[in-house]
């Protein structure tokens, strides 16, 4: 059977995809700084010239890889909030959805590389933060929607809780990378379930409304009067 010849645009797209896949493998294996343009081109089966015919440099590939991971995560959360679902079903789907990030080591490493580069490169930082802000905003919208749908007040603003969830997820992923035996899948799921239960599925009466000023006693708590022994200790 005669093979169909690719058009120039198709060949160019194929080259870009192979270079991106090669970059993903090398960034995960060696890191951004230790990976050279020659490493990426050779792994993809091309020359240095082919690399620069498609990309300006390594940061462009890293940003594209992060963007693709970000875009793939944009669709799934909509399924978490299916109409007619019970709070328990929504909670189970949320844990399953966000729990998959704990096991996605390669994509997480790409985000780590992007964060390190963003810290050192202000131009890259501006482009990268657009993804970060969109991710937090997406989770914030989900939290707010879940709260309104179930009629449960939130203990903090949705934006703060979204940032907390992202930070928790990234923190436990670091723990898993450094100590996989202690930070097992089971432990990670327990941590995630506990956080989501506290911020989204707490009973209204469990949410404190006490004065949060330093030293202010909470409502419903009895103030203990000092005993004689306590007076002697202060003296």
Image: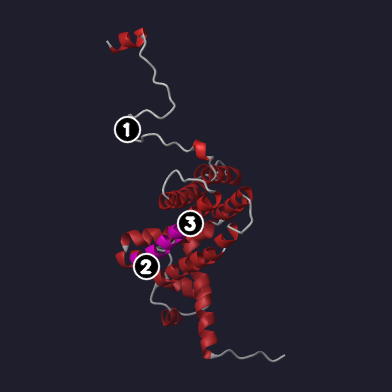
User: Dot 2 corresponds to which residue?
Assistant: 127
Q: Which mark is residue 139?
A: 3
Quarter occupied by residue 123: bottom left
The reply to whether callout 2 and callout 1 are in contact (CB within 8 Å) is no
Left or right relative to 127: residue 150: right
Q: Residue furthest front?
A: 151
Distance from disc 2 to disc 3, alpha carbons, whole Å, reads 20 Å
- Please provide percent x and percent y for residue 146: 53, 52
Q: Which residues are magenta?
A: 126-139
Residues 71 and 47: in front is 71
Q: Residues within 10 Å of mark 2 (few under 14, many from 20)?
A: few
Q: Main secondary structure of the magenta part?
A: helix
In the figure, is residue 199 to the left or right of 130? right
Badge 1 is on which residue? 214
* Residue at the image point whose x is 50% and y is 72% from the top: 20
How far apart are the alpha carbons under marks 2 and 1? 39 Å
The C terminus lies in quadrant: top left
x and y percentages locating residue 163 in the rendered image: 42, 52
Q: Which sits earlier in the primary sequence, circle 2 or circle 3? A: 2
Image quarter for residue 1?
bottom right
Q: Residues within 10 Å of mark 1 (few under 14, many from 20)?
A: few
Q: Is residue 133 magenta?
A: yes
């Amino acid at each position: 059977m005669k093979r169909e010849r690719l058009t120039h645009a198709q060949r160019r797209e194929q080259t870009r995809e192979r270079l991106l896949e090669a970059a993903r493998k090398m960034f995960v294996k060696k890191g951004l700084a230790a990976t050279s343009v020659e490493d990426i081109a050779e792994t993809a089966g091309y020359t240095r010239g082919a690399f620069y015919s498609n990309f300006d440099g390594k940061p462009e590939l890293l940003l594209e890889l992060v963007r693709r991971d970000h875009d793939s995560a944009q669709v799934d959360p909509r399924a978490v909030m299916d109409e007619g679902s019970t709070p328990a079903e929504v909670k189970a789907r949320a844990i399953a959805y966000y729990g998959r990030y704990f096991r996605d080591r390669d994509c997480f490493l790409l985000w780590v590389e992007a964060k390190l580069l963003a810290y050192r490169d202000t131009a890259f930082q501006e482009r990268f933060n657009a993804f970060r802000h969109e991710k937090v905003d997406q989770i914030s919208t989900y939290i707010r929607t879940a709260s309104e749908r179930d009629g449960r007040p939130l203990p903090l603003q949705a934006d703060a809780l979204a940032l907390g969830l992202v930070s928790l997820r990234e923190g436990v992923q670091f723990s898993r990378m450094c100590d996989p035996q202690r930070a097992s899948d089971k432990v990670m799921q327990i941590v995630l379930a506990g956080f989501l239960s506290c911020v989204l599925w707490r009973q209204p009466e469990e949410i404190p409304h006490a004065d949060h000023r330093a030293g202010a006693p909470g409502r419903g708590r009895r103030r203990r009067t000092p005993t004689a022994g306590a007076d002697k200790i202060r003296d």
